[in-house]
Image: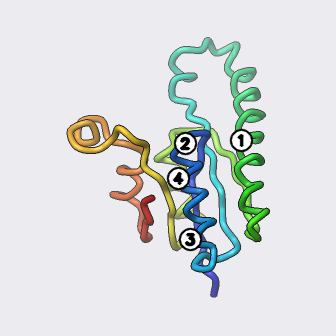
Amino acid sequence: MTPKVLIPVDKSETTRLTIDAVIANKELMPREILLLHVVDVHLVQRLVPDIQKNMVYEAAEKSGGRILEKLAKPFQDAGFNPTLQLELGTPEEVILRIAREQKIQLVIAGRHPGGGGFRDVMFGSVVNQVVRAVKCPVLLL
């Protein structure tokens, strides 16, 4: 049985480095992967008037779709078969929910530079919160 692998992605340099590392080690990876991009709506819910929220969500979904398609291309070129999933929500909550619902067996994630130490203790990071709560192994890059 092929393991189900989830790779949360965004448009950061960390994601690019994560993608490069996965592709560089493609002989160790299953070809079926799930690329998940979460549009963080936390600030939208607080700062955008209700009448404009739908417009903002639609624009965010279009942008998120373009991000996913762009990030899927290197995987496709390397012989992977990525499934693309776009969600609106709080990234750590969505990642944990998708991992649980889809019975993910491995999460591969990169850590943003500048994190760690006191900053992560006080504020946490998406990856740290996922590592602490997810019920499967996590490969940090």
Nearer the observer: mark 1 or 4; the answer is 1
The circle on residue 13 is: 2
| First-in-chain label (1 vs 3) | 1
Quadrant location of the N terminus in the rendered image: bottom right
Q: Where is mark 3, residue-wise?
A: 103
Nearer the observer: mark 2 or 1; the answer is 2
Quadrant in which residue 34 is drawn: bottom right
Question: How far is disc 2 from disc 1 in space, using C-alphas?
Answer: 13 Å
The circle on residue 67 is: 1
* Image marks 3 and 2: residues in contact by CB distance under 8 Å: no
Q: Amino acid at mark 3?
A: Lys
Question: How far is disc 1 from disc 4 in space, using C-alphas?
Answer: 17 Å
| First-in-chain label (2 vs 4) | 2
Residue extending farthest to the bottom is 1
Q: Amino acid at mark 1?
A: Ile
Say what secondary structure mark 3 lies in: loop
Provide residue 83's location: percent of width, then percent of height: 73, 61
Provide residue 67's location: percent of width, then percent of height: 71, 41
